[in-house]
């Protein structure tokens, strides 16, 4: 139905973290979701899920050995994922152009396909830019992150790719940062969500349990719910003292159930 690639140019801005946790929230909301780790050089998603070996991966798909449907695995909370694979020697044999067809195939079987893209502007990153029906750009409030994402935006526009908007991640709400308004103006794109710097993200990385699963009330998790609601076309009330109808209430209840199970 909808395929979205998360891109940034720069590494370390939160693409993999957001791909996984956004995918989980959409899956928790009852959607059929597959996340694809297209960063075959780094293969982060499997590590973030605590799964480090899979017999068939995106590697095999891009080298023409397997169909993408053979590389889909069940993750937590009904999320499906396509791991990148960990063996570096095969990176040379891949045809990155195959990514687009793989995503198309997955798209026919899912409500959402979310693709985590590699950093830089190499063949792998360029293939990722073109693989989905739309793109969301992720930036931090640092000048270097903005310079890189502007390049990606230019490349995407040249290829006629729809850019839905921007995610600002790791916001410190500090005067030393490039302001949200300046980013919006420079990029000429709407800001979909501002995600604060959140210690729970690091903790989750170390524990190999996704943030929205183990810290559902953290600022990061709340941002993921907001983003998911936006993609589902639902409005949520950001005022936490009021009753939140619809999706947000549903996900909150889901989180509450998960949480109570652990206690
Ligand atoms: N909102 C956040 N708050 C704190 N740490 C974050 C946040 N988003 C990402 N990180 C951390 O930043 C690092 C890079 O994130 P990652 O998702 O791997 O980025 P990318 O995929 O863009 O390279 C990781 O250590 C991750 O835990
Ligand atoms: Mg990554």
Image (tube, rainbow, N blue to C red):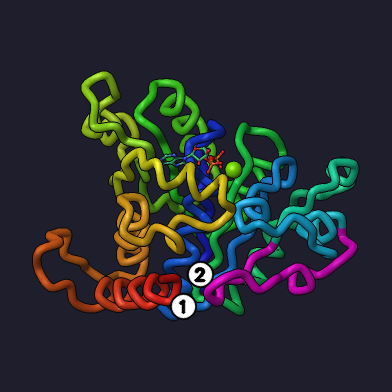
Q: In terms of secondary structure, where does tag 1 sit?
A: loop
| Quarter residue 258 falls in | bottom left
- Residue located at (69% from left, 34% from top): 122
| Quarter residue 246 falls in | bottom left
Mark nearest the camera among 1 and 2 is 1
Residue 181 visible in the displayed image: yes
How much space separates mark 1 and mark 2, taking CA atoms? 7 Å
**Viewer-side residue, 11 vs 98:** 11
On screen, residue 263 above or below 147: below
Assess whether mark 2 and mark 1 are in contact (beta carbons under 8 angstroms).
yes
On screen, residue 113 above or below 181: below
Label 1 near ligand 1 (CB < 8 Å): no
Residue 25's x, y, as percent?
42, 67
Sort mark 2 into few (<14), some (14-19) or many (20+) by Cα contacts within 10 Å: many
Marked residue nearer the N-terminal end (1 or 2):
1
Sort mark 1 into few (<14), some (14-19) or many (20+) by Cα contacts within 10 Å: some
Magenta span: 64-82
- 242 sits left or right of 11 in the view: left
Q: In terms of secondary structure, where does tag 2 sit?
A: strand
- Residue located at (80% from left, 48% from top): 86
Q: Which residue is mark 2?
A: 112
């Amino acid at each position: 139905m909808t395929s979205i690639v998360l891109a940034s140019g720069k590494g370390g801005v939160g693409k993999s973290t957001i791909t996984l946790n956004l995918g989980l929230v959409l899956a928790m909301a009852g959607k059929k979701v597959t996340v694809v780790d297209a960063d075959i050089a780094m293969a982060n998603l499997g590590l973030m899920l605590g799964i480090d070996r899979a017999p068939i991966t995106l590697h095999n798909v891009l080298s023409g050995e397997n169909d993408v449907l053979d590389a889909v695995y069940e993750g937590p909370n009904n999320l499906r994922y396509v791991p990148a694979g960990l063996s570096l020697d095969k990176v040379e044999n891949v045809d990155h152009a195959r990514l687009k067809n793989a995503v198309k195939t997955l798209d026919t079987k899912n409500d959402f396909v979310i693709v985590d893209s590699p950093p830089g502007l190499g063949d792998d990153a360029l293939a990722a830019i073109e693989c989905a029906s739309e793109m969301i750009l992720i930036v931090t409030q640092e000048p270097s992150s903005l310079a890189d994402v502007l390049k990606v935006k230019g490349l995407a526009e040249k290829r006629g790719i729809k850019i839905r908007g921007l995610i600002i991640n790791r916001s410190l709400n500090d005067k030393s940062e490039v302001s949200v308004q300046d980013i919006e103006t420079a990029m000429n794109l709407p800001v979909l969500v501002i995600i604060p710097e959140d210690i729970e993200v690091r903790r989750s990385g170390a524990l190999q349990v996704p943030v929205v699963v183990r810290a559902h009330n953290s600022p990061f998790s709340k941002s993921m719910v907001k983003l998911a609601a936006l993609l589902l076309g639902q409005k949520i009330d950001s005022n936490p003292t009021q009753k939140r109808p619809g999706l947000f209430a549903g996900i909150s209840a889901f989180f509450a159930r998960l949480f109570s199970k652990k206690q």
